[in-house]
Image: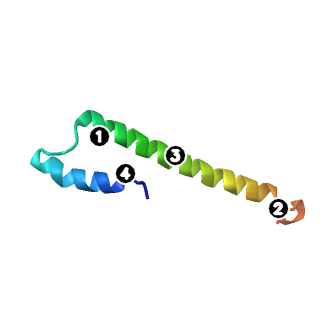
Amino acid sequence: MSPLAPLFTLHAPAAQRGDGLRPELLALLLRRAQHENHDQEGDDVSAQKRQRSSCPTSIRAQ
């Protein structure tokens, strides 16, 4: 979970009252959260590639 998740959770009800985050700040935080998610997905793919490459050829063929 992103460390920004609690902030977004609080933003939703505050925005309904007109007390939410400024649009510029919200856009910045959303871009940062997307970037963090993309980095985590990339790490998962890299780990899978490393795991496959360390597997002997005879096992990979099965």
Q: Specify the quadrant that holds the N terminus.
A: bottom left
Q: How far apart are the two marked residues, 3 and 1, measured between alpha carbons?
A: 18 Å
Q: Are marks 1 and 4 in contact (CB under 8 Å)?
A: no
Label 1, secondary structure: give it.
helix
Residue 35's label in the rendered image is none
Q: Is residue 49 left or right of residue 45?
A: right
Which callout, 4 or 2, points at the residue further toward the start of the chain? Answer: 4
Report the residue marked by disc 2. 55
Q: How far apart are the two marked residues, 3 and 4, measured between alpha carbons?
A: 15 Å
Label 4, secondary structure: give it.
loop
Q: Residues within 10 Å of mark 2 (few under 14, many from 20)?
A: few
Check disc 2 and give the amino acid type.
Cys
Name the spot of residue 54 as percent of width and height, x first.
82, 58
Which callout, 3 or 4, points at the residue further toward the start of the chain? Answer: 4
Q: Residues within 10 Å of mark 1 (few under 14, many from 20)?
A: some
Name the spot of residue 42 as percent of width and height, x first.
60, 48
Residue 38's label in the rendered image is 3
- Residue at image x 89%, y 64%? 58
- Residue at image x 61%, y 55%? 44
Q: Are marks 4 and 2 in contact (CB under 8 Å)?
A: no
Residue lying farthest to the right in this orientation = 58
Report the residue marked by disc 4. 4
Residue 26's label in the rendered image is 1
Name the spot of residue 13 as percent of width and height, x first.
17, 54
Label 3, secondary structure: give it.
helix
Q: How far apart are the two marked residues, 1 and 4, measured between alpha carbons?
A: 11 Å
